[in-house]
Each structure stands twice: as C-alpha cells, then as structure tokens.
Image (cartoon, rainbow, N blue to C red):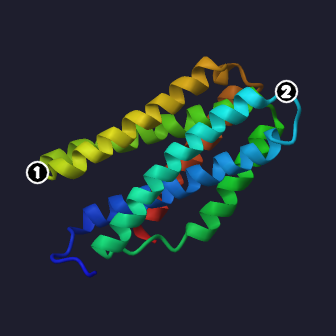
C-alpha cells in the first residue's frame, strides 16, 4: 500500500540507513555463529550471539515494514553490506571470542550515538512515535554493547586497532547508505 504523504527526505535517509545497519548486524552475527557453532565448548557465546541476532532480526523486520509501508528506497549497497558484514563476523570470530565481542562493542558504540542523534532529531521534528521506537531500538543495541564489554571485548588482541577500524567502517557505511 503506498504511503499517504511523502516522508521528508531526512527521515527517508534515517529509515534507509537504519534498515541497512540492521541488515548488516544480522549478517555479522550469522558470520560469527557460523564459526563458533562448529567449535566445541562455545555454547555460551553461541547463545549470546543467537540472542543478539534475534534482536537485530526484530529490528530489521521493523525497518523492512517501514521501507514497504512508507515507500522508502533501500540502499543500493545492501548486497555489498551483507557480504562485508558476514565477512567481518567470520573474521572476528576466527580471531576468538574477545575479538567477536570487540566487533559488537565497536559497532554498537557507533550505533548508540547514531540512534541517539536520530532520536533527538525526530523529537525536534515532532515525530514522537518514531523517536520512541528508535529509542527502544537504541536501548537494545546498548544492551548488546554491555554484554560484549562484560565478556571482555576490550581485552581482545589489538583491540584499539580492531575497534577503530570497525568504527570507521560503520561510520562510512552510514554516510554512504543515507544517499546511495
């Protein structure tokens, strides 16, 4: 069903980039689980990753619905982000549990700030319903980050470099996905 009134361009950008981000988050966790599910003694991290992936899938479903209902064009980068995110998941899992958690911590740190800025912008625009939804999603992303930190994310080998590269990649993907 087509939307009744066009969304402002900025809100379309928000929906487009958040859809892409949730799509990528699901792919990261799938990549990590693909590694850890094949290893003995990794039930705890597999359970954590499964739970976080389920949350991300719920978020993706919300943005899938918005894309459809509001007629927002998804990013053309979706296939590339999917492959890159899955690869990031596999690569960090191969580096070990702490590196996998460092990936989550880095991604969710950027996303916490990203959703936080969107919530403020939506509130300023009077979009209180969307602002509340985005705040709820942000809070769930923060919970993922907290789990990762509790599990030793910041003790991963090469953490400052690993975290910095992942954060830079996330910020770049956000900017590209808003427009392309």
| Residue 12 in sight | yes
As measured in the structure, the alpha-carbon distance from the residue carrying label 2 to the one carrying label 1 is 49 Å
- Quick one: SS at disc 1? loop
The disc at residue 41 is 2
The disc at residue 102 is none
Q: Is residue 44 above or below residue 176?
A: above
Toward the left, the furthest residue is 126
Tell me if 154 is positioned left or right of 62 in this view.
right
Tell me if 61 is positioned left or right of 81 in this view.
left
Q: Which residue is drawn at the image coordinates 32% and 76% (left, top)?
A: 71
Q: Is residue 167 above or below residue 146?
A: below
Q: Residues within 10 Å of mark 2 (few under 14, many from 20)?
A: few
Q: Which residue is drawn at the image coordinates 52% and 52% (left, top)?
A: 57
Q: Which residue is mark 1?
A: 126
Determine whether label 2 and label 1 are within 8 Å by CB: no
State which quarter of the image contains the N terminus.
bottom left
Q: Which residue is drawn at the image coordinates 68% and 58% (left, top)?
A: 84
Q: Is residue 40 above or below residue 119?
A: above
């Amino acid at each position: 069903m087509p939307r009744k009134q066009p969304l402002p361009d900025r809100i379309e950008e928000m929906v487009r980039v958040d859809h892409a981000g949730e799509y990528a988050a699901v792919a990261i966790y799938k990549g990590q689980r693909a590694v850890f599910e094949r290893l003995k003694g990794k039930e705890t991290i597999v359970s954590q990753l499964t739970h976080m992936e389920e949350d991300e899938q719920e978020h993706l479903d919300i943005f899938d619905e918005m894309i459809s209902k509001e007629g927002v064009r998804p990013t053309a980068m979706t296939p590339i982000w999917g492959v890159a995110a899955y690869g990031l998941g596999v690569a960090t899992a191969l580096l070990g549990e702490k590196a996998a958690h460092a990936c989550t911590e880095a991604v969710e740190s950027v996303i916490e700030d990203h959703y936080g800025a969107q919530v403020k912008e939506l509130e300023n625009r009077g979009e209180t319903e969307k602002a509340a939804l985005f705040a709820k999603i942000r809070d769930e992303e923060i919970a993922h980050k907290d789990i990762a930190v509790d599990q030793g994310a910041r003790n991963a080998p090469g953490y400052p470099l690993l975290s910095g590269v992942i954060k830079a990649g996330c910020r770049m993907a956000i900017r590209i996905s808003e427009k392309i």
